[in-house]
Amino acid sequence: MLTRRTMMAGALAATLGAAPGRAEPDWPSRPITILHGFPAGGPTDLVVRIVIDSLSRRLGQPIVVEGRSGASGTTAAAQVARAVPDGYTLFAVPSGHTFAAATFKALPYRTIADFTAISMFTEYSYLMATYAEHSIRSVADLVALARQRATPLLYGTPGNGSGPHLAVELFAKEAKITVQHVPYRGSAQAATDLIGKRLDFMMDPPAVLIPFVRDGRLRAIAVTGASRFFSVPDVPTIAEAGVPGYIVTGWQGLLAPAGLPVPILSRLNAEVVATLKEPSVIERLRTIANDPHPTTPEEFKARMEADIAKWTAVVDDMNFERI
């Protein structure tokens, strides 16, 4: 029989989303659903579909991937935040999960507290590029030209408040230059205008820009990570190229609703980590310019917290009107 105190404690735990639930003894005993908030064929969808081939085999159950696009992924996030934490509803997220926390006035969920971090899937640098005929051939050239020109250099991004938008604004601040943002509805449109010489440069995930670099229409001038990126090993980091301390990377990862039972969390983390160490998975992820980056739940949570703090400071500094 449930006492009034037990019922109140259970209700409080459900409200806070903090207390781990009781694990189903034979979990998983039925198919698992991984939601994400973006269209099919996008970066998050591609990473998840590569990972689930092995993860499903390891868990012994089918894994269904469902995209619920809308409001920069926040629609799906709100749905997962309200889901039962039983291990059958999981949530694949890009680093945009933390950008939303920095750029939205309000969200229908708590970005950290309403979720259980399981592991990162991958990490990647952004690539900075200009059109092949531009006089800019290095970061030093870009900075020098930005300081000399009467009008700001134009850069394109997939939208206001996107990762590339915030990353370029951070670069501009640290390089002490002024640049003009031109938002688009997606990276493809921005890349088209860069190739058409209507923009001066872009900063975007390598998977978007590398095909144009390889066919000679764009020139890669830097990557944003702490070290050179495997897809373009001859391209220097921005820190190497003259802006010391500048480091920005994007990532993909896996969450669950808050309160996921510890045994299920431990099993999921172990299987994701093992999956990301498989040579075939590493090879497939690298074909889409993602570097496997398994973590502990604690490391992933700490990364999200650090990113929210970092991007909130950038947004506050650039006087961005929150969405």
Image (cartoon, rainbow, N blue to C red):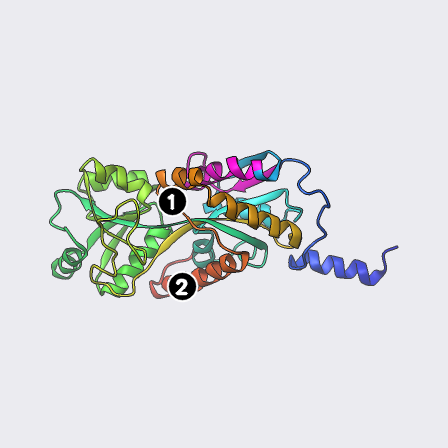
The residue carrying mark 1 is 290
Q: Position of residue 211 (x, y in %)?
A: 26, 37
Q: How many marks?
A: 2
In this rendering, position of residue 255 left or right of residue 11: left
Vertical side of 232 occupied by 143: above or below:
below
Q: Secondary structure at mark 2?
A: helix
Q: Position of residue 297 (x, y in %)?
A: 54, 56
Q: Which mark is residue 310?
A: 2
Outermost residue on the right side: it is: 1
Q: Which residues are magenta?
A: 32-57
Q: Secondary structure at mark 1?
A: loop
Q: Quadrant of residue 33?
A: top right
Residue at 36% x, 41% y is 286
Q: Quadrant of the N terminus?
A: bottom right
Q: Is residue 67 visible?
A: no
Residue at 56% x, 57% y is 110
Q: Is residue 53 visible?
A: yes
Q: Amino acid at mark 2?
A: Lys
Magenta stretch: residue 48 in it?
yes
Q: Amino acid at mark 1?
A: Asn
